[in-house]
Image (tube, rainbow, N blue to C red):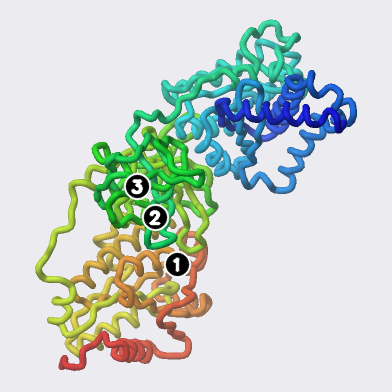
Amino acid sequence: MSDQAPATHVAIEAYLAEQAEQTELRFLTCGSVDDGKSTLIGRLLYDSKLIFEDQLAALEADSRRQGTQGEDIDLALLVDGLAAEREQGITIDVAYRFFATDKRRFVVADTPGHEQYTRNMATGASNAELAVILVDARKGVLTQTKRHSYIVSLFGISEVVLAVNKMDLVDFDQSVFDDIVAEYRAFAGNLGAGLNITAIPVSALKGDNVTKASNVMPWYSGPTLLGYLESVQVGALEDAHPFRMPVQWVNRPNLDFRGFSGTIAAGAVRPGDAVRVLPSGKTSRVNRLVTYDGDLDEAGPGEAVTLVLEDEIDISRGDVVTAAQAPCQVSDQFAVHLLWMHDAPLYPGRQYYLKTGARTVPCVVTELKHKINVNTLEQLPARSLELNELGVGNISLSHRIAFEPYTDNHVLGSFILIDRQSLETVGVGLIDFSLRRADNVHWQALSVNKTRRSALKHQKPCVIWFTGLSGSGKSTIANLLESRLHDEHRHTYVLDGDNVRHGLNRDIGFTEADRVENIRRVGEVAKLMVDAGLITIASFISPFASERRMVRDLLEPGEFIEVFVDTPLDVCEARDPKGLYRKARAGEIANFTGVEQDYEAPEHAEVTLHTVNCTPEEAAESLLDYLRERGFLDSAVS
């Protein structure tokens, strides 16, 4: 073997060098559970190894006889290994497989079929150029088939292989294949005109039409799956597209070097090119294109480079460097498509972090226009999105970002949503376009500001936010507190949960989505009142920590005082001043907090009042002392 090894190694190195020059195709496999994805991928990996060995057969014959034969992949073992990965929970991530033939290199995103892993399928789709959608010939087109097809279309994948698998279990019946293809094409016809579907009948287990033509399905004359994958042409970003590069890192190892590192998302760049940095709009020219292997004369899509500019301008991580004469857009409000990926529903008005590229900004989904029935593609009214649901809505950011619609640029047009408390990824979105109001609505500069208004009143404005169960005593204490402040000639206003529902929020019910919107509106009003210099007292059950945090984030540090009126449920229910608990227990009131809906108690409230141990008057007096001690009340007022 040692005599032949050098020749074998040379042959392998030559083969790998040849593969490095081949084009690469990134595709994903998806579909429903038990449709045969593991077997199909196992067949592709196994047969591609045989193809590789056939290429080297002349040079490797002796060495293979001396031991390499024992390294041949057993298809059954390979498939069992892929299945074992799923049993061990590896399906929570996308598994990527790599193989090559003499014509092309391949990266396969092996995505799970279970509905709870839709997020992983979306991850695979975001990096793929082609989708192989499997259908079990015995079961036909299922809901998961349609959901995955919609996501494929949503992520701009135009090339789709409909692999009708397990044809051996339906006796290779052409009519079964034809019926499935007809049903799928009828459904896919509503996904958009750009979808190019190639249907192939296969038996992954037996290998029919996977890498070699089947001799038991003479009625099919199209390409094998591998043959199609080797020859298909997929679209890619062209160099003619204007240059875009999100900055991932500001590289300054010493005072003599300052570069901006990132992966080019579109277009090409050369030394001397004029560039514009967004969202600041500052301009400069490229001095050098630096890489680990040395400077480049030109760089294009997918290349990681460090730009050194001629001018010393301020650029931060998350900024986007663009062609100076053809910059992308900048906005803070968008129409978007959303795929929700968390057990807790999405509600408009609830705040999240939006992450696109290297930039993370606070955001809020301001409106859900509709959600999409994946079976019929019907647009349904929606006030929330549940796990794995798809919808269309509007989103508002705290800061303007550089972007392009997803159809023009997958990098600058996509984002994820992150829960602000757990920091979990809860959704993925695609930007459709900037909302017109983002460009037409501007802040009007005013001569009189919050500082001047509050100075005139001799007080420091704030929001005193009472939260607790119904019957805990919130409104009573809030009313007493305002009376005491009024006696001291303070400027106040009380926003009471019941009172605002007679006017501002009269159109809102008591579902979880309604409660989110209720607090969002009140929070915005409270912010305006603080800007007016008022001490604003808000009394709301406000059962969700995320909404209380949303109001806190609307205000300046120190302006939000959370007061937890901590009264046990049994005490509140015994008081029941409005008879609401009795009605809720009788089923006359739905979604009542403490009965059908949970209450999320504050963990770090500025003030906690235990009303079992003190009177409302004592509670109000303790809050008055709190305001005095922290400088909210100017002692000069009489």
User: 499 or 219, which is in the foreground?
Assistant: 219
Give me the residue at 56% from left, 29% from top: 24
Disc with the residue nearer the chain's start (1 vs 2): 2
Q: Which residue is mark 2?
A: 317
Q: Position of residue 7 (x, y in %)?
A: 77, 27
- Label 3 sits on what residue type? Val
Give me the residue at 58% from left, 43% from top: 120
* The C terminus: image quadrant: bottom left
Q: Secondary structure at mark 3?
A: strand
Q: Secondary structure at mark 2?
A: loop
The CA distance from mark 2 to mark 3 is: 9 Å
| Residue lying at the far left of the rendered structure | 447
- The quadrant holding residue 22 is top right
Q: Which residue is mark 1?
A: 545
Q: Which residue is mark 3?
A: 320
Q: Judge the density around disc 2: few (<14), some (14-19), many (≥20) Cα neighbours within 10 Å.
A: some
The reply to whether discs 1 and 3 touch (Cβ–Cβ < 8 Å) is: no
The CA distance from mark 1 to mark 3 is: 34 Å
Q: Position of residue 93 (x, y in %)?
A: 62, 46
Q: Is residue 309 left or right of residue 421?
A: left
- Mark 1 against mark 3, which lies toward the viewer? 3
Q: Secondary structure at mark 1?
A: helix
| Residue lying at the far right of the rendered structure | 66
Q: Is residue 70 left or right of residue 118?
A: right
Give me the residue at 64% from left, 7% from top: 221
- Mark 1 against mark 2, which lies toward the viewer? 2
Rendered view: 509 above or below 66: below
